[in-house]
Amino acid sequence: MTPNYDARIRRAEYLSSTYPFAAEILAFYRRICVIQQKLSKELHDALDRQSRWPAAAGTLREQMDLELVLPFVKQALSDVVPASPEPLALYIKEFLRGSPERWAASLERYVTQANANGTPEDSREELLARILIDPYAELLAAKQSVLPSAAGNLCPLCEGRPVTGVLRIEGDGGKRFLLCAFCGTEWEFRRIYCAFCGESREQSLPVFVAEKFPHIRVEACDTCRHCIRSVDLTKDGHAIPVVDDLAAIPLALWAEEYGYQRIQGNLLGT
């Protein structure tokens, strides 16, 4: 399914009133959602008009044609500026004064390197690339009718790392999925298992839940010192993992205090 940006926007508005400390971040995210919703439609129309939907060969990253995105760079990023903190706004303006070749190189770096080693060289550049590439990646992912069976801890479509876990109702309990940071694909993953190193000893996999976020848990690993947040839809069926994760800022402080590194950061680094 293609992303429902209206639902994401509504959820961000609701969470802004529930968690005032996250209101500024969520307001910025809502603006990004509006821009990505428009970009998603434009890219979808361009793919239809130019008959450029890719064949199934290759990974999702290999299927991406960045020439398709370049015509939309200037308008999309210009629309981000009014909602951006001043340092980011200045960076975007400087970025847009660069050549289309610079833009293409930046997008190429993100597509080929994103989610490979955790921390990007420049978080500002990666943010701009994610704003532009996420809608395209999610469109291509939505066109895949069947997921490859051998997924492991990397996305079966693009080999990206997970940004969050998702617990969905299954029978009398919950089934665990991972959500790709690059293309938004969900795939099934073992419940008691580190999503980074594969540790399976329960005593090495502590879980932390904060009172403010009863439906979000930090699943940590004492073997590799990585962690991932999981959104439990069995406790809050209205949650949208990609949005609720942005609001869970105190959980990042807990992970930092105890020395755990997130497997993959979310769009705004919260």
Image (cartoon, rainbow, N blue to C red):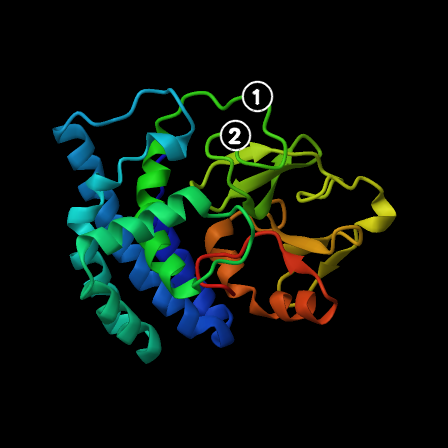
Residue under label 1, please give it. 149
Residue 156 got which mark? 2
Q: Quick check: 28 above or below 181?
A: below
Give whichever of discs 1 and 2 has the lower sequence position.
Answer: 1
User: Would you say the residues marked 1 and 2 are in contact, meaning their CB atoms lie under 8 Å apart?
Assistant: yes
> What residue do we see at 39% from left, 35% from top?
61
Question: Furthest-bottom residue in view?
Answer: 86
Secondary structure category for the residue under label 2: loop
Residue 196 x, y percent position in the rendering: 67, 44
Residue 111 x, y percent position in the rendering: 39, 44
Residue 183 got which mark? none
| Quadrant in the picture for the N terminus | top left
Left/right placement of residue 194 relative to residue 121 reads right
Left/right placement of residue 151 relative to residue 96 reads right
Residue 239 visible (yes or no): no
Residue 246 x, y percent position in the rendering: 49, 61
Q: Quick check: 29 above or below 85?
A: above
Q: Residues within 10 Å of mark 1 (few under 14, many from 20)?
A: few
Secondary structure category for the residue under label 1: loop
Q: Nearer the viewer, residue 202 or 50?
A: 50
Residue 121 visible (yes or no): yes
The amino acid marked with disc number 2 is Pro
> What residue do we see at 51% from left, 35% from top?
159
The amino acid marked with disc number 1 is Ser
Q: Nearer the viewer, residue 46 or 30?
A: 46
Q: Quick check: 168 above or below 102?
A: above
Q: Nearer the viewer, residue 154 or 202?
A: 154
